[in-house]
Image (cartoon, rainbow, N blue to C red):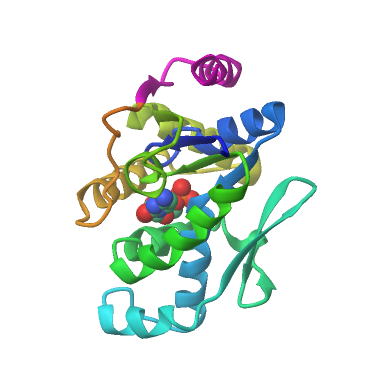
Amino acid sequence: MAYAIAIDGPAGAGKSTIAKRVAKELNYIYVDTGAMYRAMAIYFMDNGIDCNSEEQIQSAVDGVDIRIEYADGVQQVILNGSNVTARLREEAVGRMASATSGYGCVRAKLLELQRNLAETSNVIMDGRDIGTTVLPDAQTKIYLTASSDARAKRRYDELVEKNGNADYEEIKADIEKRDYQDMHRTISPLKQADDAVLLDTSDMNIDEVVAAVKKLIR
Ligand code: C5P
């Protein structure tokens, strides 16, 4: 049977950075489920779909085909035949993903894809509902979090390094809004699974978190 490690937690807790490192060290496949919600969001944006209209979302979902490929171990997301990986991290895409991830039709489509990936390979999968819904039988479950201040500070530093400037208060407000939406939706809200281990990384560096996660897996 394949081994599954589920990492859930709010935006900016460092899930993907940690999961990528651990996957490389253990030779597991890293599955970034947020990227799938983001690819779906790109489709909605490119096709002028109103994120407040369940009817529009519902009929659009049928036209979406998302596939996951790996290039040198790096996850690539193919949306209706086009590789959209380079666009996934745009701020507007993240906002649209958060606004549309509460729809049952969106979640059902991606759930199937996520479970299929975990069936045949050892995976470390990160998201919001992996331990609670997608892989409830995962052998290791971690809830990775950090204070909203710590998460906003990390994102701020990242953006300053990339663009030379950033607005801390705006970043923090965006993170808190995203947390609220993800934790209060009806279907698969973000929450710690009963059998997940809580890891608060507010005062930890990346090496310390990687070591802590590897210890939990052993
Ligand atoms: O993790 P990331 O920021 O890429 O996720 C983008 C959005 O996708 C999240 O804000 C959340 O609304 C949604 N998401 C989700 N369930 C997951 C992964 C992501 O609802 N398993």
Q: Report the number of numbered marks.
A: 0
x, y percent for residue 159: 56, 42
Residue ranking furthest to the front: 1
Q: Quadrant of the C terminus?
A: top right
Q: Quadrant of the N terminus?
A: top right
Q: Nearer the viewer, residue 139 or 193?
A: 139
Quarter where residue 17 is shown: top right
Residue ranking furthest to the right: 72
Whether residue 151 is situated above or below residue 129 in the rendered picture: above
**Residue at the spot 28% in from the left edge and 52% down from the top edge:** 188
**Residue at the spot 37% in from the left edge and 85% down from the top edge:** 59
Inspect the magenta stretch and tell me whether residue 215 lies in it: yes
Whether residue 11 is situated above or below residue 203 in the rendered picture: below
Whether residue 124 is situated above or below residue 208 in the rendered picture: below
Q: Is residue 104 left or right of residue 20?
A: left
**Residue at the spot 29% in from the left edge and 67% down from the top edge:** 103
For the magenta stretch, what is the residue range? 197-218
**Residue at the spot 36% in from the left edge and 41% down from the top edge:** 136
Inspect the magenta stretch and tell me whether residue 101 lies in it: no
Q: Nearer the viewer, residue 26 or 17?
A: 26
x, y percent for residue 108: 37, 65
Q: Is residue 55 left or right of residue 43?
A: left
x, y percent for residue 77: 63, 62
Q: Nearer the viewer, residue 127 or 195?
A: 195
x, y percent for residue 179: 30, 44
